[in-house]
Image: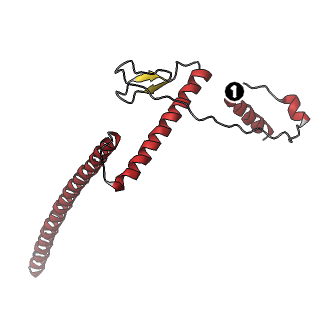
Amino acid sequence: MALLNKLGEIVKSAAEKTEELTKTLGEKAEAALEIQRLNSQVNKERSKISDTHKKIGEILWAKFEAGEEIPEEFKEHCTAISEALTKIDEHKVAIAKIKATAFAGEEPKTSCPSCGAQVTLNSKFCGECGGKMPVHEPEPVEEEAAPLTETVDETKAETAEVVDTPAKAEAAETEKTETKA
């Protein structure tokens, strides 16, 4: 009988410990969920702050573009943005011209600074809003002459292929390299 009583006490003790462990695990799980919920709220608030920072920057930029007075510490940054936008526009013009000539695309276009409509590069006024268009004259690109001191390997010259595009030239070179290997 003493053995059964002893076993009963062990089972009762194990049940109490299991109940205590379950309660502790439940509390920890609830705490972990609460921490996750609060971290989510922190991230939402950080996102709001980031959006507000962006809006502040947009407001300052709009004032700068409109010629309004802005604090000195922002003028340098706004000037840098303005210069970057000018370079972007120049690059877009160069891309459009390349597309128009090399790929028989349509006449190059740019965005109207007043309304954002697409206007051909040679237009003096926007067809949508009538705004005056800036004159686009990209800086000339200087080409370096290839050195004439290289000698031609006659075996390569005999098997050389004539290619009319850089892509074909690269493909031909890759094929030659693979053939040698």
Image point (69%, 27%), residue name: 165
| Quarter of the view holding residue 157 | top right
Q: Nearer the viewer, residue 68 or 31?
A: 68
Disc 1 on helix, strand or loop? Answer: loop
Q: Is residue 164 left or right of residue 132?
A: right
- Where is residue 151 shown, x and y percent of the image? 88, 40
Q: Is residue 163 left or right of residue 62?
A: right
- Where is residue 104 shown, x and y percent of the image? 58, 18
Task: Decide: is 27 above or below 40.
Answer: below
The residue at the far right in this view is: 154
Q: Nearer the viewer, residue 127 or 165?
A: 127
Image point (34%, 27%), residue name: 115
Task: Decide: is 30 above or below 171.
Answer: below
- Where is residue 162 shown, x and y percent of the image? 78, 25
In the rendered image, the quadrant that contains the N terminus is bottom left
Q: Amino acid at mark 1?
A: Thr
Task: Decide: is 92 above or below 101.
Answer: below
**Number of marks in picture:** 1
Image point (25%, 49%), residue name: 52
- Where is residue 47 shown, x and y percent of the image? 26, 50
Q: Nearer the viewer, residue 110 or 31?
A: 110
Image point (27%, 48%), residue name: 56
| Quarter of the view holding residue 37 | bottom left
In the rendered image, the quadrant that contains the C terminus is top right
The residue under label 1 is: 165
Q: Nearer the viewer, residue 173 or 67?
A: 67
The residue at the far bottom in this view is: 2
Q: What colour scheme has been applied to the protein in the rendered image?
A: secondary structure
